[in-house]
Amino acid sequence: MPSFVDRVVLHLAAGDGGHGCVSVHREKFKPLGGPDGGDGGRGGDIVLVVDPNTTTLLDYHRSPHRKATNGSQGEGSNRDGANGGDIELKVPDGTVVSTRDGEVLVDLVGAGTRFIAAQGGHGGLGNAALASKRRRAPGFALLGEPGEAKDVVLELKSVADVGLVGFPSAGKSSLIAAISAARPKIADYPFTTLVPNLGVVEAGDVRYTVADVPGLIEGASEGRGLGHAFLRHVERCKALLHVVDLATMEPGRDPLTDIDLIESELEKYGGLDKRPRMVALNKIDVPEARELADLVRADVEARGWEVFPISAATHEGLRELTYAMGSLVASARAAAPAPEPTRLVLRPAAVDDSGFTVTDEGERYRIRGLKPERWIRQTDFTNDEAVGYLADRLARLGVEEALIRAGAHAGDEVVIGGEDAVVFDWEPSVSAGGEHLGPRGTDSRLS
């Protein structure tokens, strides 16, 4: 079982809304005291919350299926059902939520940021809430709406100020262990680091975070090695530090070639080639490496980058490097625009927005819209009076007039909704009005 996970697929199921209740108040001397059925409770939501103490998505890798509780059914004596309990899922800072198709839903940055990933269903109205002057004792109630069921992809992109990039065994893990309290695994073989590591560094008055990313190799942006899986962790970094191995014994390797190959992979990945750069020439505790640092330093500085010969093993040059990184981070923070306060955005519906659409699909007419589709899900089609109430609601919304304008005729097939659609033969002669009501639970228009 892995100890670090930065990408998971969550299977979410929000709670269903509780059904409304059909009840008539009865007591001594009041045999028909009127409808008193309560409303159903709301289904529970599934909410993602950014938690600073959470650093991995491992919990969701182990148990990816999460379900909120359902709302309770309404009861007589005007007792509403209890709401379902919400589920809060803690995620690391920098988690991107998207669909399986790659559409980004939200980017969760900042402690306490919340996002409703799956919304619970609305509770159905009881017959007490459905009573009116025309319909004094409804013999039906509305069903609870099903909660959302969806799959979402969580992808972690670490929030760090400086990202360490370089070939395997360049000394990135040793460097982050030397300048911070982080204790990554360190060994004398390639690909020791299998997961990103974060360390907090203090340089004077500046406090910043450094990310140690698993070693990159040529072709990392196309999936070779481990780089493709973890390049996302340097996307949010304000600056990048090339850690160059001056003591490598591999044939065909030299500091400038290593830098060029890493730069090429960053450019191919996209969005990383414009970040400020610094270069740390590591392992100068080896005599040959110190001589090589003196030879290549001028060539690297000619590219406009600051160069720091260092030794992560003996800590030589680390003070100058950490203060230089702190100065670069401080400048980047000062240049960043001030955060704007959260604003409440109101988007009123257009004057000519009817709340639904009618589409002629040739053999049938399809109605789409938030209200019609919700009403369909809340209708008990085994109850004639409930079906008649649905017809009243659709008529008041203007669906019948829209079908006539679209060219529909009596007997044409009409579909309301998408995947969970309801199909019926349209009869325009059915008009709305309480005068069609008969005994409770019946409707003369449907007899």
Image (cartoon, helix red, strand yellow):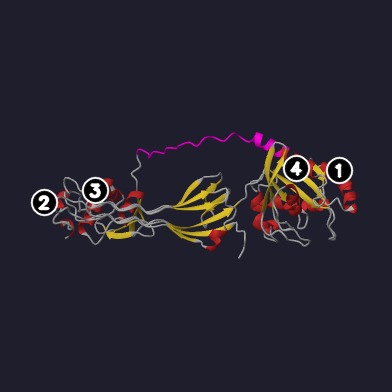
Q: Residues within 10 Å of mark 3 (few under 14, many from 20)?
A: some
- Do tag 4 and tag 3 residues touch (Cβ < 8 Å)? no
Q: What secondary structure predominates along the stretch shown in magenta?
A: loop
Q: Amino acid at mark 2?
A: Lys
Task: Quickly name the residue at label 2.
Answer: 30
Mark 4 to mark 3 CA distance (whole Å): 67 Å
Q: Which residues are magenta?
A: 327-351
At x 52%, y 35%, the residue is: 341
Task: Quickly name the residue at label 3.
Answer: 129
Mark 3 to mark 1 CA distance (whole Å): 81 Å
Query: Where residue 258 appears, x then y in whole percent?
Result: 79, 53
Sequence-earlier tag: 4 or 3:
3
Q: Residue furthest left?
A: 29
Q: Amino acid at mark 4?
A: Thr
Q: Would residue 103 appear left or right of 262 to someone viewing this image?
A: left
Q: Residues within 10 Å of mark 1 (few under 14, many from 20)?
A: few
Task: Quickly name the residue at label 1.
Answer: 298
